[in-house]
Image (cartoon, rainbow, N blue to C red):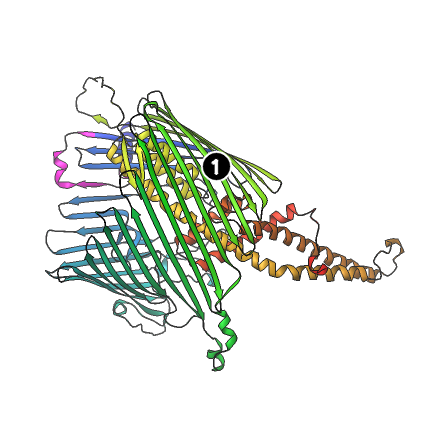
């Protein structure tokens, strides 16, 4: 029995050791003389009290252990666990298994892995199987894969939102050969669904069918005149939408030769060409790309299609590299097959100038101009075969967005005793929507954003202060709004830099046409303590107080984190006596990321990142947990070089998340503005309906008659129905007016400040996950704005039902 337990535990340990991702070199395995164990574990808990619909308590556990043999062979194990439900009502245990052994120029990928052959064939799709990269010295390279792309899942009426899937297998290869002057490459990818992998009947409206796909691409690159470089790629993808179909059919395209074709088979093409010429200390580039409508393969999660792009870009460094210039121009259009009722054209231009005359001053200027044209086509030409109607010209739409930004950073003093710096930025965002050459009502808006910040630090005292003043001023057709407020913060290290403390507070207030709308005040506290170089305790508290149009709201979020690091425990055949090590001062690290510099000890930098983590909102639970997981992995890394890599991983993910949030906020404001216009148009009709309904009640012969005196029951029932209709019309108008007031106030807020609106922040907490999915899937702006608008209506309607009961109705149109 004991032997079985030992065998079981040993087997479990070996399996767990392969639980994350490994790379080892078989050649060096025999040289292993020493085993190192590193890694750690952490526990993160979040307490929340407020009006948002989120769990009052949640936790996240994760850890990693890495066994290294002689610095050559790594066996890492990682686990994570959270009580977040993710829509299934049960906690989720997340696991992945993959190994990547290598021998000389052969690298294998085994388990749950992903590979990319081409952006038009296999593009980052995860599969469970085997892949290999062969990169021998010379001109010949080969990559190949085979595995399961999708698991099968049956239709479950208990979870109708989960779309069933067929089991899908795929294989492919990519090969290239580099001649002296020309490099050529060929890629083939094929995937097919197993018809028998789904047994339960699938509702017809879900449009789920077994598919088969073959995609091929041909790449070339060559150089002319020793400098001019050309890159081209042509791809063809042929898809059979339903392999169960027995009707004969044929798809055009080279990939269709390897496809089982029927009447549902179609073929699509994609082409991309690029020219690059080095000029001076920069480059000049020209590009062209064309992708057929509906182009896709089963080897990727998302593909751009139905577009034609023309791009020009140039970069140059001048004045002894003190000035950097970057220029980009682009033209894009869709509706390539003329099947849509409108065609969209986009013109994009941007200019970036970066000026660094010395180590103290940095000045950057950015300008971008985005123009889009939507030309509606006359659908009656297809119906009646007649000429254009003049009034359809009014459907032609033009949108112009301009953005300009200036950033200035100046280092006033930088020595051992004192560090002082000042920075300022100013930006302008201007948008104009036009129809038939004229600006439409509510179609013009301009926002001015400015901020000035000052920081002072005393390195010898481990003390620093910072303060800033932020301002946003917006002008729209419906009015002017202003948001302004200061922020101050302080950071201090204690106990030989083992305890890092941070505190900050900010206050801002907003005005609409000179009238005060709301006040928001928040306090942030954070502390981090390192004990015996292995234990890290972190506490963070955020408290927000808001007062909006007479309604007060208080939110409190507290985060408690504990992390433990193994710190490379060395396992030797013989026990060696421990020797005391002299304390070494923590080194100062410097990390550059996207023109931002994080400098200080590891604890100071981690504290800065923790501040970033606490400030990001709104964010889906899964995204937030992922960022916290990456930040925890960084805090558990003892090696400074690996720490930088972990921090860069975190900053990459943080940048993607913040960029997505910025897009969401922009789409959210546009959805509010769109809904405001629609509600304004509907307002008079609702008031008229209420006026007519109450007029019928007042004019009825039984109006005002005592119920005891009524003898005609039929006439009385008719009167009661009129009263009921009148009440419904009154409630509908009252709720509509309340919604219009709240939505109009939010619509006048800039995208940068929209989350400071109480109702908008609560809405975002509920709907951010779905919005993130749409943005990540690169849905069009129109689709995302419409999807958000659909969610806004019931959300604000529920609030209106609760808050508009005592509101009086102003019959403003009748009075006019």
**In-front residue for pair 548/630:** 548
Look at the image and say whether residue 30 sits in the magenta stretch. yes
What residue sits right under mark 1 in the picture? 486
Task: Establish if 631 lies above or below 103.
Answer: above
The image shows residue 290 at horizontal and vertical percentages of: 31, 66
Q: Residue furthest right?
A: 709
| 471 to the left or right of 332 | right
Point 12% across, 61% down: residue: 181
Look at the image and say whether residue 682 sits in the magenta stretch. no
Name which quarter of the figure residue 683 lies in.
bottom right
The image shows residue 40 at horizontal and vertical percentages of: 31, 30
Task: Establish if 250 lies above or below 611.
Answer: below
Span colored in magenta: 15-35
The image shows residue 270 at horizontal and vertical percentages of: 29, 65
Point 50% across, 77% down: residue: 390
Task: Establish if 412 lies above or below 362.
Answer: above
């Amino acid at each position: 029995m004991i032997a079985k337990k030992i065998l079981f535990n040993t087997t479990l340990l070996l399996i767990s050791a392969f639980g994350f991702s490994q790379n080892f070199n078989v050649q060096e395995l025999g040289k292993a003389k020493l085993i190192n164990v590193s890694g750690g574990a952490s526990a993160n808990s979040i307490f929340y009290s407020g009006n948002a619909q989120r769990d009052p308590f949640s936790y996240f556990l994760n850890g990693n252990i890495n066994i290294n043999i002689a610095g050559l062979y790594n066996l890492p194990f990682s686990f994570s666990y959270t009580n977040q439900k993710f829509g299934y009502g049960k906690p989720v245990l997340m696991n992945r298994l993959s190994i990547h052994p290598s021998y000389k120029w052969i690298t294998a990928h085994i388990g749950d892995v992903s590979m990319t052959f081409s952006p038009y064939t296999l593009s980052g799709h995860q599969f469970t199987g085997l892949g290999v990269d062969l990169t021998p010295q010379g001109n010949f390279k080969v990559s190949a894969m085979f595995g399961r792309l999708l698991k099968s899942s049956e239709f479950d009426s208990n979870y109708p939102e989960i779309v069933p899937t067929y089991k899908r297998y795929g294989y492919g290869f990519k090969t290239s050969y580099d001649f002296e002057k020309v490099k050529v490459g060929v890629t083939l990818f094929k995937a097919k669904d197993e018809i028998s992998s789904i047994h339960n009947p699938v509702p017809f409206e879900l449009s789920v069918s077994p598919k088969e796909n073959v995609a091929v691409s041909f790449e070339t690159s060559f150089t002319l005149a020793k400098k001019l470089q050309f890159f081209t790629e042509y791809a063809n993808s042929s898809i059979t939408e339903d392999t169960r179909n027995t009707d004969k059919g044929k798809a055009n395209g080279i990939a269709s030769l390897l496809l089982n074709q029927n009447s549902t088979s179609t073929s699509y093409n994609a082409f991309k060409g690029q020219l690059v010429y080095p000029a001076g200390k920069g480059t000049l580039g020209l590009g062209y790309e064309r992708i057929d409508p509906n182009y896709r393969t089963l080897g990727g999660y998302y593909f751009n299609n139905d577009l034609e792009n023309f791009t020009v870009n140039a970069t140059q460094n001048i004045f002894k590299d003190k000035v950097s210039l970057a220029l980009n121009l682009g033209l894009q259009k869709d509706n390539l097959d003329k099947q849509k009722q409108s065609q969209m054209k986009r013109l994009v231009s941007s200019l970036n100038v970066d000026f660094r005359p010395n180590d103290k001053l940095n000045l950057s200027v950015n300008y971008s101009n985005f123009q889009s044209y939507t030309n509606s086509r006359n659908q009656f030409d297809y119906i009646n075969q007649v000429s254009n109607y003049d009034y359809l010209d009014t459907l032609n739409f033009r949108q112009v967005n301009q953005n300009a930004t200036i950033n200035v950073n100046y280092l006033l003093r930088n020595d051992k005793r004192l560090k002082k710096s000042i920075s300022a930025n100013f930006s302008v965002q201007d948008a104009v929507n036009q129809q038939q050459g004229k600006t439409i009502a509510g179609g013009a808006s301009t926002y001015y954003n400015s901020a000035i910040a000052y920081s002072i630090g005393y390195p010898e005292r481990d003390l620093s202060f910072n303060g800033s003043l932020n301002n946003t001023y917006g002008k729209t057709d419906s009015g002017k709004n202003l948001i302004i407020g200061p922020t101050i913060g302080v950071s201090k290290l204690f106990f030989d830099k083992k305890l890092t403390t941070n505190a900050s507070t900010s206050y801002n207030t907003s005005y609409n046409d000179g009238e005060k709308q709301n006040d928001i005040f928040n306090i942030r506290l954070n502390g981090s303590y390192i004990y015996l170089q292995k234990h890290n305790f972190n506490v963070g508290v955020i408290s927000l107080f808001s007062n909006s149009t007479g309604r007060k709201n208080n939110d409190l979020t507290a985060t408690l984190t504990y992390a433990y690091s193994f710190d490379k425990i060395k396992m030797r055949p013989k026990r060696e006596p421990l020797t005391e090590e002299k304390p070494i001062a923590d080194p100062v690290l410097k990390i550059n990321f996207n023109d931002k510099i994080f400098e200080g000890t590891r604890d100071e930098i981690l504290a800065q990142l923790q501040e970033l983590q606490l400030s990001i909102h709104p964010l889906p639970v899964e995204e937030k947990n992922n960022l916290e997981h990456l930040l925890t992995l960084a805090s558990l890394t003892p090696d400074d070089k690996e720490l930088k890599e972990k921090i860069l991983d975190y900053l990459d993910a943080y940048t993607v998340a913040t960029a997505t949030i910025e897009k969401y906020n922009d789409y959210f404001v546009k959805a509010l503005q769109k809904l405001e216009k629609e509600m304004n148009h509907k307002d008079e009709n609702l008031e008229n309906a209420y006026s007519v309904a109450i007029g019928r009640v007042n004019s009825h012969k039984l109006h005002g008659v005592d119920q005891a005196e009524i003898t005609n029951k039929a006439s009385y029932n008719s009167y009661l129905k009129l009263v009921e209709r009148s009440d419904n019309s009154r409630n509908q108008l009252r709720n509509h007016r309340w919604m219009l007031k709240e939505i109009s106030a939010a619509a006048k807020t800039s995208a940068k400040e929209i989350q400071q609106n109480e109702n908008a922040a609560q809405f975002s907490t509920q709907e951010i996950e779905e919005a993130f999915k749409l943005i990540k899937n690169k849905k069009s702006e129109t689709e995302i704005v419409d999807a958000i608008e659909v969610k806004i209506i019931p959300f604000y309607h529920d609030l209106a039902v609760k808050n508009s009961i005592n509101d009086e109705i102003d019959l403003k149109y009748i009075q006019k």
